[in-house]
Image: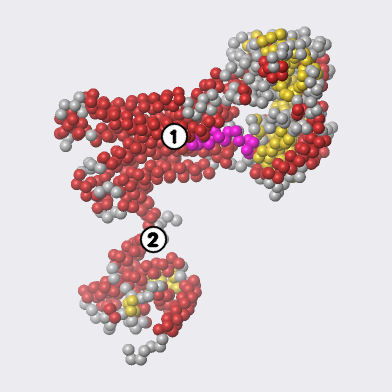
């Protein structure tokens, strides 16, 4: 169980889910549930990912050829569909990351330095 | 290709696996089984929604729907086979007619000519005072080739026939004399051997010939060593240089060359051919240089013509050069007919669509509940409309497929029936473009006739329909149906008016007096391999002997060998001036008269009335004074009220002065419909005996002839052949045609248009009477209850009949009036195709109106009668 209430979690910005999925897959093939968990855990439970919302995104990425999928067996011996980052996906991840960093920086500048305390 | 990329089942399995993994993770965190399952679901969100989103994100959703619709549509059609059969047949007729006609338009008008870069090809003619397309004299052609700057090459050609001997029976072969540039210009290479060389296209060069693939197979057994072999034509040996593939054919405006042999034009040693004064039926074709426009070529050639007029003022003055794009030259005349017919079949298809739309409307009453239920179950309106349209397009496609079969068969049959009517008729096929057109027409038709019924069904009120058990809504519906029927009637009226005007025109044309009696008259051509005589006198004698031999054939009443003009078949003109006038400086300034070189019995053969003086007689010989007989129009045009008998006329080309000894009636030369408006109407007759020696030498290998037989004969060719062979052994008689046949061939295009219009108009009547019958039957069915009440309240049977007929009559009258108005507006478009009737011909209009109203009332009689038989008790019980 998470330590925070769902209401306090951050909703994902439009378009960021794709980036997060690609980023997660950099460590190797993973299935849908694993990806969802990984995003939540690496973000220190800050991000709210409804697992169901993951699938249209996975579908989209697969159609674009950035990830590929194959049925396999999970660590606890369950059948699951594993997603792998493709070469094109790697490139895309690079592009998206740069874009995202520039965006974050720009927004950060506009908002000014973090207020103390808060 | 047509499956979705990933099966829905596979996706569902993945979701289940996800939930299972999450469940196990939550269990691992210490939750109870119940709690863990709930937590997994909560983390996932809406499972159903995820599945739906996956399903709808599939690129092939529309395809799934489409397949569903098609399956459903097919099932619906199977369930009502009567409706399906009628609708499909109606559409097959409409689409089939369109496919057939479009395949004709495609082959004749749209497809490029089968030559290299056909758009750069231009037909050239001499432009004479009275003719835009006059044949070219060879010396002029050579000068055109030398002096122009617009054409990369010019080629000349003329048709001729030869008698082929040394290979069994003597056989006539059609030949084309062509300049060496002809085949290279058109981009045609022989399949074997080589084209003619420049040096072979000269007077005195060795005789060479190209033969067609057909002749090569037929007479040479497809011998591979054909090049270098020889062929004997008109007694001379020609060395074959190559074989022209069967795919090649060259058509002229009114003439489809069946040539099997080609020989170099420049070799022809006929002295008249070298005369700048004489065009020997020679035309030319040119290929524009890259970058030169048609207009530039036109002005360049008029410069060439002006220059020649300066150099040869007595001959070329007043002459120009006519240029016409080759394709336009070939199909220009037929274009308006084809476009009119295309519009006509478009109308037929519209009527078919309206008919099917009406059937659908009538049927949709029964299906209202079905749609209401689907609506209630959550189908959107657009989904229902789409499904109905799919059903309609399905119908149309089946109809289209059937129609294509009909078209393939019908086109072949129609073309066989009237082969003379169309240029390029051998290029008409159902090709990819035609099939694409049919597909497009079918889909469009399906949408067209489906749209109104579909929207009407989709928009109907769900609750009302479900509550009312299928009745109701009928008012608006049969208003639409009535409007449809009126529209159909209007379209049928337009077609019928067009057909009626065409039929009236042809009737009027047939009424035109040709000036001769064509019944039992036959035309023929004879050709000999050897000259008919070595001297002009020997030739004259041969002609007399041939005349006598043919006259002795049983059944032949009278015969005349004839040269130069033949009515409605071929024409030849002589420039002339009258005695006492100063000789015009150039031929272009002289008047022209149609020239008939004949024998004295010509008058009996053609039964032309002798008006004054005498006709030519056997005593008009080369030794007696030169005489001529002129026709009434010549007399009136040249002499006015003076008496022409005894006057003298100077004729150029013949270089003779002849005394007028008689006047005969005018013969129709240019075709029944166009003779009276033609530029050259004067006619003059000369005895072949008195033809000048030079001209006679040009006639030494045969001529035309006319015979009158005592009864209509179908196969006189063999006996004519035998008769001519008694004078010249290697001779052939061919092209034997009845004069009536020649007249009707001259009307082929008009008759073709008339027949098709009549067929389409009858189709239109049949379809629209089915339409009006259907609607009235439907309305009567709907009103059974009301009629029952009326009758229970004492209405007479006749009142009921009148009531029903009145309703039908309103529709019909409205449709007919609308149709007549439309016809009056559109009629202008076909004015140029009519003869002797105006496009708003009152008789045609009123007859058509009467026919359509009659047919409409007849079609309604059965339902009206049925209405009057309604038993009031049954009708009221029914509720």
Q: Is residue B766 left or right of residue B655?
A: left
Q: Is residue B246 above or below residue B857?
A: below
Q: In this rendering, does residue B282 appear at all? A: yes
Secondary element under disc 2, as helix, strand or loop, is loop
Residue count near mark 2 (Cα–Cα under 10 Å), binned few <14, some 14–19, many ≥20: some
Residue at the bottom extreme of this rendering: A116
Name the quadrant containing residue B11: bottom left
Residue B254: x %, y % from top left: 64, 30
Name the side, left or right, on which B248 lies relative to B477. Answer: right
| Residue A92 against residue B509 in the figure, above or below | below
Q: Which residue is mark 2?
A: B58
Task: Using the image, tell me which numbered label, if any, was put on residue B810.
Answer: none
Q: Which residue is mark 1?
A: B822
Q: Is-magenta flag for residue B337?
A: yes
Q: The numbered mark 2 sits on a residue in which chain?
A: B
Which quadrant of the view contains residue B444?
top left
Please give the range of residues in magenta.
B327-343
Picture residue at 26% right of the left edge, 45% below the top: B368
Q: Is residue B51 magenta?
A: no
Closer to the eye: label 2 or 1: 1
Rendered view: B156 above or below B598: below
Image side of residue B857 versus residue B838, left or right: left
Quick one: B394 or B673, which is closer to the camera? B673
Residue located at (17% from left, 32% from top) = B789
**Quarter assignment of residue B151:** top right
């Amino acid at each position: 169980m998470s330590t925070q209430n769902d209401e306090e979690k951050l909703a994902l910005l439009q378009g960021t889910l794709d980036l997060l999925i690609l980023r997660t897959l950099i460590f190797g093939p993973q299935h849908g549930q694993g990806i969802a968990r990984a995003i939540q855990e690496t973000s220190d439970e800050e991000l709210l990912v409804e697992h169901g919302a993951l699938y249209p995104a996975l579908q989209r990425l697969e159609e674009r050829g950035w990830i590929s999928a194959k049925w396999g067996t999970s660590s606890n011996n369950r059948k699951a569909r594993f997603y792998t980052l493709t070469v094109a996906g790697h490139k895309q991840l690079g592009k998206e990351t740069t874009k995202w960093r520039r965006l974050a920086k720009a927004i950060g500048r506009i908002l000014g330095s973090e207020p103390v305390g808060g | 290709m047509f499956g979705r990329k990933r099966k829905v089942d596979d996706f569902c399995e993945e979701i289940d696996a996800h939930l299972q993994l999450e469940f196990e993770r939550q269990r691992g965190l210490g939750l109870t089984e119940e709690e863990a399952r709930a937590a997994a679901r909560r983390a996932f969100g809406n499972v159903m929604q995820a599945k739906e989103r996956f399903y709808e994100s599939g690129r092939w959703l529309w395809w799934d729907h489409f397949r569903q619709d098609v399956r459903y549509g097919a099932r619906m059609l199977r369930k009502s086979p009567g409706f399906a059969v009628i609708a499909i047949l109606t559409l097959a007729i409409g689409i089939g007619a369109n496919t057939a006609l479009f395949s004709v338009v495609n082959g004749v008008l749209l497809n490029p000519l089968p030559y290299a870069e056909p758009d750069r090809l231009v037909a050239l003619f001499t432009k004479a005072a009275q003719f835009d397309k006059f044949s070219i004299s060879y010396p002029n052609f050579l000068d055109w080739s030398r002096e122009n700057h617009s054409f990369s090459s010019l080629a000349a050609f003329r048709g001729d026939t030869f008698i082929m001997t040394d290979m069994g029976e003597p056989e006539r072969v059609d030949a084309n004399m062509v300049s060496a540039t002809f085949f290279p210009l058109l981009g045609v290479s022989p399949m074997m051997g080589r084209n003619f060389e420049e040096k072979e296209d000269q007077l005195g060069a060795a005789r060479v010939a190209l033969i067609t693939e057909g002749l090569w197979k037929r007479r040479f057994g497809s011998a591979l060593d054909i090049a270098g072999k020889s062929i004997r034509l008109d007694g001379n040996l020609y060395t074959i240089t190559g074989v022209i593939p069967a795919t090649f054919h060259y058509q002229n405006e009114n003439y489809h060359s069946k040539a099997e042999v080609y020989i170099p034009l420049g070799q022809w040693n006929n002295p008249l051919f070298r005369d700048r004064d004489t065009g020997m039926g020679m035309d030319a074709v040119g290929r524009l240089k890259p970058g030169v426009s048609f207009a530039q070529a036109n002005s360049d050639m008029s410069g060439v013509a002006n220059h020649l007029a300066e150099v040869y003022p007595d001959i070329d003055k007043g002459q120009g050069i006519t240029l016409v794009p080759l394709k336009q030259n070939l199909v220009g005349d037929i274009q308006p007919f084809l476009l009119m017919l295309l519009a006509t079949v478009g109308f037929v298809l519209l009527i078919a669509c309206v008919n099917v739309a009406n059937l659908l409307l009538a049927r949709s009453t029964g299906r209202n509940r079905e749609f209401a239920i689907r609506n209630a179950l959550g189908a959107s309106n657009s989904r229902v409309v789409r499904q109905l349209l799919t059903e309609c397009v399905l119908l149309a496609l089946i109809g289209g497929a059937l129609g294509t079969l009909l078209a393939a068969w019908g086109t072949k049959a129609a073309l066989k029936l009237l082969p003379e009517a169309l240029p390029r008729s051998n290029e008409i096929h159902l090709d990819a473009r035609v099939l694409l057109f049919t597909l497009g027409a079918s889909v469009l038709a399906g949408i067209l006739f489906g749209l109104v019924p579909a929207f009407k069904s989709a928009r109907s009120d769900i609750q009302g329909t479900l509550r009312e058990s299928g009745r109701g809504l009928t008012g608006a519906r049969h208003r639409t149906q009535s409007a449809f029927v009126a529209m159909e009637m209007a379209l049928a009226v337009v077609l019928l008016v067009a057909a009626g005007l065409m039929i009236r025109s042809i009737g009027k044309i047939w009424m035109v007096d040709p000036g001769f009696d064509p019944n039992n008259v036959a035309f023929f051509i004879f050709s000999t391999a050897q000259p008919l005589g070595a001297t002009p006198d020997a030739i004259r004698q041969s002609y007399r002997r041939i005349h006598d031999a043919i006259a002795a054939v049983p059944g032949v009443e009278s015969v005349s060998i004839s040269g130069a003009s033949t009515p409605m078949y071929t024409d030849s003109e002589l420039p002339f001036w009258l005695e006492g006038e100063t000789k015009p400086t150039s031929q272009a300034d002289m008047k022209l008269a149609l020239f008939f070189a004949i024998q004295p019995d010509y008058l009996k053969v053609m039964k032309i009335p002798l008006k004054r003086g005498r006709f030519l007689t056997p005593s008009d010989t080369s030794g007696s004074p030169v005489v001529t007989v002129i026709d009434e129009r010549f007399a009136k045009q040249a002499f006015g009220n003076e008496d022409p008998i005894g006057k003298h006329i100077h004729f150029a080309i013949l270089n003779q002065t002849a005394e007028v000894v008689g006047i005969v009636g005018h013969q129709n030369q240019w075709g029944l419909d166009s003779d009276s408006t033609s530029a050259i109407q004067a006619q003059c007759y000369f005895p072949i005996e008195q033809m000048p020696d030079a001209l006679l030498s040009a006639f030494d290998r045969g001529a035309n002839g006319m015979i009158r037989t005592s009864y209509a004969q179908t196969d006189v060719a063999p006996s004519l052949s035998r008769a001519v062979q008694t004078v010249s052994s290697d001779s052939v008689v061919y092209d034997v045609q009845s004069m009536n046949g020649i007249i009707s061939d001259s009307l082929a295009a008009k008759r073709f248009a008339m027949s098709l219009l009549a067929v389409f108009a009858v189709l239109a009547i049949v379809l629209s009477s089915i339409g009006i019958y259907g609607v009235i039957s439907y309305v009567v069915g709907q009103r059974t209850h009301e009629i029952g009440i009326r009758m229970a309240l004492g209405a007479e049977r006749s009142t009921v009949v009148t009531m029903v007929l009145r309703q039908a009559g309103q529709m019909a009258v409205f449709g007919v009036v609308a149709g007549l108005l439309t016809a009056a507006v559109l009629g202008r478009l076909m004015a140029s195709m009519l003869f002797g009737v105006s496009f708003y011909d009152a008789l045609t209009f009123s007859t058509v109106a009467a026919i359509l109203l009659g047919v409409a009332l007849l079609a309604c009689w059965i339902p009206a009668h049925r209405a009057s038989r309604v038993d009031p008790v049954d009708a009221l019980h029914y509720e």
